[in-house]
Image (tube, rainbow, N blue to C red):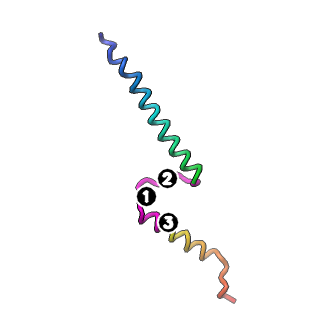
């Protein structure tokens, strides 16, 4: 009778283990696809600012034709 809680631990352990596996799979798939870990809490504003910053850096890195 006292080992009854042990019956519940096996399914709960399996569920917890699978949640950990799926979370890590999402992390590694996103890192493989984008080259960096996912930023938690990224909203539309953050994405727009990253896009803007990337565009500015590309413009600054390209050789300007107006300097001749």
Disc 2 + disc 1, Cβ < 8 Å: yes
Residue 52 in the image, given as x and y percentages of width and height: 50, 71
List the single residue furthest toward the right.
68
The magenta region covers 34-48
Instruction: Report the residue marked by disc 2.
Output: 38
Q: Which mark is residue 50?
A: 3
Instruction: Report the residue marked by disc 1.
Output: 42
User: Residue shown at 33%/18% (left/top)?
Assistant: 5
Mark 2: which secondary structure?
loop
List the single residue furthest toward the bottom.
68
State which tag comes first along the sequence, 2 or 3. 2
User: Residue shown at 51%/44% (left/top)?
Assistant: 26
Mark 1: which secondary structure?
loop
Residue 1 in the image, given as x and y percentages of width and height: 29, 10
Residue 65 in the image, given as x and y percentages of width and height: 67, 85
Decide: few, some or many residues near mark 2? Use Cα within 10 Å; few <14, some 14-19, many ≥20.
few
Q: Is residue 44 magenta?
A: yes
State which tag comes first along the sequence, 3 or 1. 1
Disc 3 + disc 1, Cβ < 8 Å: no
């Amino acid at each position: 009778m006292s080992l009854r809680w042990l019956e519940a631990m096996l399914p709960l352990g399996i569920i917890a283990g699978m949640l950990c596996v799926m979370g890590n799979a999402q992390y590694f798939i996103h890192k493989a696809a984008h080259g960096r870990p996912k930023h938690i809490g990224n909203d539309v504003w953050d994405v727009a600012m990253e896009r803007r910053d990337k565009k500015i850096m590309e413009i600054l890195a390209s050789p300007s034709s107006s300097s001749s």
